[in-house]
Structure formats: structure tokens, C-alpha cells
Image (tube, rainbow, N blue to C red):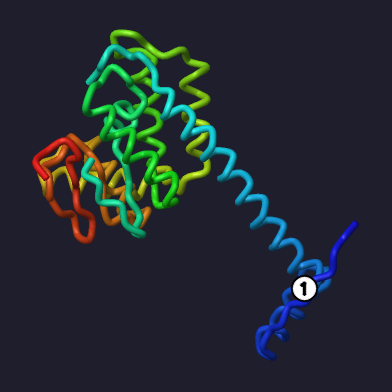
Amino acid sequence: MGQNLTVHLDETTATKAKVLAARRSTSVSKLVAGQIERLVAEEDVYEHAQQTALAQLERGFHLGGGPMPRCMTDERVSVDTNILVYSYDADAGSKHETANSVLADLWRSRTGTLSAQVLQEFYVTVTRKLPEPLARRVAREIIGTYQAWSLHRPGVDEVIAASELEERHRLSFWDALVVVSAQRLNARTLLTEDLQNGRRFGDLVAVNPFGPS
């Protein structure tokens, strides 16, 4: 059974809403209801993913200790592959504790961002490159939770931009592509072990969580 809600709009917004509803062959009430339902559904998806991810982080996995400052703010933070790997590898000692805590903070603050490239590298690393590889099914479950984060999928423009960045800053191409994705996501911090701590790329700063504070 539906429940009625009263929404107050200024005259200009109300007029535009009527025009928009007409273009979509619906009513303003149904248009507003649809938007609210979408927002509630997105919130449900995030909360479910967050609960699953925090449980996985708390549990940790014994990956054999394979291959972040606590700077949590309300600004977006992008994470590199090594941060994800350490956060789930219970055999990585202090690096696991640091990365695990950082990832949990990002989930709670909803400021975490990722590149699809990082998820791909994470999958290959934890299922093939560590002393005790993770089962592919478990890796897929972990990766699936990050659908709730803001993600960037590099395209042709990003490949070209990464090539230019690689040449200009003498980075590896793959590191440059991670930087470009973080920039596209409007992140202000890139948590990574692969770049010099404090190195800047415009408004983006690389932070090594395991270096001197």
C-alpha cells in the first residue's frame, strides 16, 4: 500500500518538473516517486556491499604476505592495487593492519574510488601471484562489493593522457593510467606504494601509507 508524501517546490522548479514529466509521459508525482525509489535502492545496494566488504576485511585471508596514512577526509580518495591486496592479506603484518583500517574508513566515509584497472590487477595478483592464491570465487565476491564505489573505466582518451603523463613525469605507463583515473574521479589523494610520497599531479597527491608520517 502506497503512502502519500507532500513535496514543496518553488514555482520555477515546479514548472520545469511539469514539462519534464510531460516529456516522459508521466505525472510529476510519479516522476518524484521514481527518483526517490532510485535513491533508496542505491542506498540499499551500498549498505549491503558495505556490510559484506567490512566483514571480508575483518576476516582477512591468509595469502602468504605478498607484495596508508590515515588522512581520511570528506574528499575523494583513490586506492591503488597494493592497498587492496594488503587490506585483505592477513599475512602481511603491519601493512595489512594499516591498509585494512584505511579501507574500512573509506567504506564508512563513502569517499573511496577505484579504477577498473586496479580491480583487474587485484584479481590477477590475489589469484595467481601470491604464495597462497585466493580462490577465484572469493576474489570475485570481493571485487563485486566495489560496484558500490565510484569507479572509472579508462578509455582511449585516458590511454593517451596516461602516455603523455608517463613521458612527462617518467612514470611507468600503468602507474600513469592509475593517476589519470584518479584525476577523472576527482580524487584529491591517491593511496599507493608505487609513487613517491607527496608527489603531486595537479590537485592529486600520491600518499604512501607505509612511509614516514
In front: 99, or 169?
A: 99
Instruction: Give coordinates of residue 176: x percent, y percent.
Output: 22, 42
Q: Identify the residue under disc 1.
A: 21
Instruction: Report the label total.
Output: 1
- In the image, residue 152 sits, relative to residue 129, either above or below, namely below
Q: Amino acid at mark 1?
A: Ala
Which is nearer the eye, 39 or 20? 39
Name above or below for residue 125 compared with residue 177. Answer: above
Q: Residue furthest bottom?
A: 11
**Residue at the top extreme, as displayed:** 132
Q: Secondary structure at mark 1?
A: helix
- Residue 121 location (% of width, % of height): 34, 27
Q: Is residue 110 left or right of residue 17?
A: left
Q: Residue at x 35, y 55 (%)?
A: 76
Residue at the image point whose x is 9% and y is 41% from the top: 212
The quarter of the rendered structure image containing the C terminus is top left
Residue situated in front as seen by the camera: 120 or 157:
120
Viewport quadrant of the N terminus:
bottom right
Q: Residue at x 29, y 34 (%)?
A: 99
Task: Bin the neighbour count of mark 1 within 10 Å (Cα to Cα): few under 14, some 14-19, many 20 and up.
Answer: some
* Residue 90 in the figure: left or right of residue 67: right
Q: Residue at x 52, y 43 (%)?
A: 148
